[in-house]
Amino acid sequence: MFRAVVVTGPRQAGKTTLVRKVVGDAGTLVRLDRQPVLQAVLADPAAAATQGAEPRAFDEVQRGGDALVRAIKVVLDDNRTPGQFLLNGSADFLTAPMLTESLAGRAAFMEMWPFTQGEIGGHPDGFLERAFSNPEELLGAELSPLSPGDYLHRVCRGGFPEAVALPGRSRGVWFRNYVRSVTQRDITELTGARRAQHLPKILSLLAARTANELVSAHIHDASGLGSRNTTDDYLSHIQMVYLAHTLPAWSRGLTAKITRHPKVYIADSGLAAHLLGKDPTSLARPTDPARGPLMETFVANELLRQASWLDHDVRLHHFRDRDGGEIDLIAEAADGRVVAVEVKAAQTVSTQDARRLTWLRNKIGSDFVCGAVLHAGERSFRLNHDVYALPISTLWLNP
């Protein structure tokens, strides 16, 4: 269908493994993370773009720079046959500073994130699909088999394939090395950042604000960096390599007092918990202020992944007004239909927890498909005729 497919996402999410399976023995895989191979490609990108059997896969394509991408563009312009190239990389293809050629109109773009809970457990991740197509099915689930402690374990485990398989203490070492590698090597190599030693601190400051609005001035004030421009650049770099992502504010003119700041999330809840020094035991304390934001980060990342593979376009947002009213997550389809989600780390839910969802339904009318308060309890029940209380496990355990 497409002449080229570009797959990007965080390092260690499984992109290279996917490429190997897709290309198999019939195609050509070029590993640009191997220095001799990279040097040969940089020396003659035009030859590299035409050598070997199709599909030609370039792993970590951003290392080849504009010269390689432009050579690939020439091949695609001369031949409109689908399935010629599979390009993958650990930096956003459209924002990486060394790439000015976007391959617009020639390539399909996909993002590959760490595992979902369904992928880890072998269950279909069907929440968003069911919420938009037949939300009443969401109430059909049996009692959730997960306890609050189980959820906290999953939050701290995250979804990076290698980290998932490690015990807690070894997982902490893995995350520590991962942060060091991406911030000190990858970002520096991609951007030429001169004060890379500040990047881990910026990332930790973002972790402390995960599931909250991103106000770059606040990050700058806490960072110790002299230049506000440097802080803004480093925030962009962190998002470019998929360590964090933002959700825009949602509005249909419901109120003149809507805030416009995006909401920021660390891209993996396990990474966020590591950066905050949290484990399931510490998060189980009722007074721990990180439990709610980390649980919301966990849910937001699950929904982001589900939205990426739906047949129809669904985009995630958040809502907040200046009076403090907010809705954690709003999934809006291209036709304007909305599914709204609140996340509660507690086991009990009341109609009071759904008041903003009810308010939104009354504001947008028939475009409101359903609302869900996702909680750490075991029961599914109706809070209103189209607003439900659902265990968080409903995200991946279908009824």
Image (cartoon, helix red, strand yellow):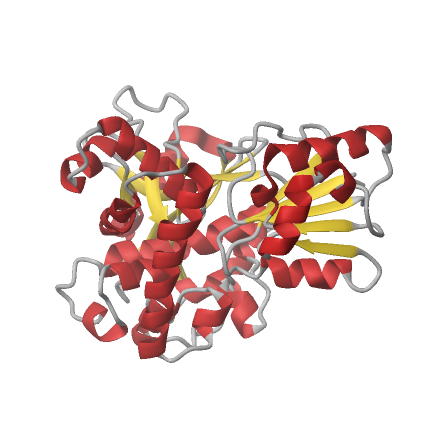
* Rendered view: 121 above or below 26: below
Q: How many marks?
A: 0
Classify residue 17 by image quadrant: bottom right
**Above or below, 374 relative to 361:** below
Residues 195 and 229: in front is 195
- Kindly tell me whether residue 1 is visible in this rendering: yes
Is 189 situated left or right of 333 in this image?
left
In this picture, residue 18 sits left or right of residue 247: right
Q: Is residue 290 left or right of residue 47?
A: left
Position of the N terminus by quadrant: top right
Which residue is pictured at 44% across the width and 44% down the height? 189
State the image coordinates of residue 375 (x, y, percent, origin top left). 34, 61
Residue 155 in the image: state x and y as whole percent.
Answer: 35, 65
For the point 31% across and 70% down, the residue is 152
Task: Answer yes or no: is residue 384 visible.
Answer: no
Foreground residue among 360 and 51: 51
Q: Give the camera-side residue of 247 and 74.
A: 74
User: In the image, what residue occupies the spot 46% across and 31% down?
Assistant: 365
State the image coordinates of residue 379 (x, y, percent, origin top left): 39, 69
- Residue 332 in the image: x percent, y percent? 50, 37
Please state, as top left, top right, bottom left or bottom right, where the C terminus lies in the image: bottom right
**Outermost residue toward the bottom in this view:** 167
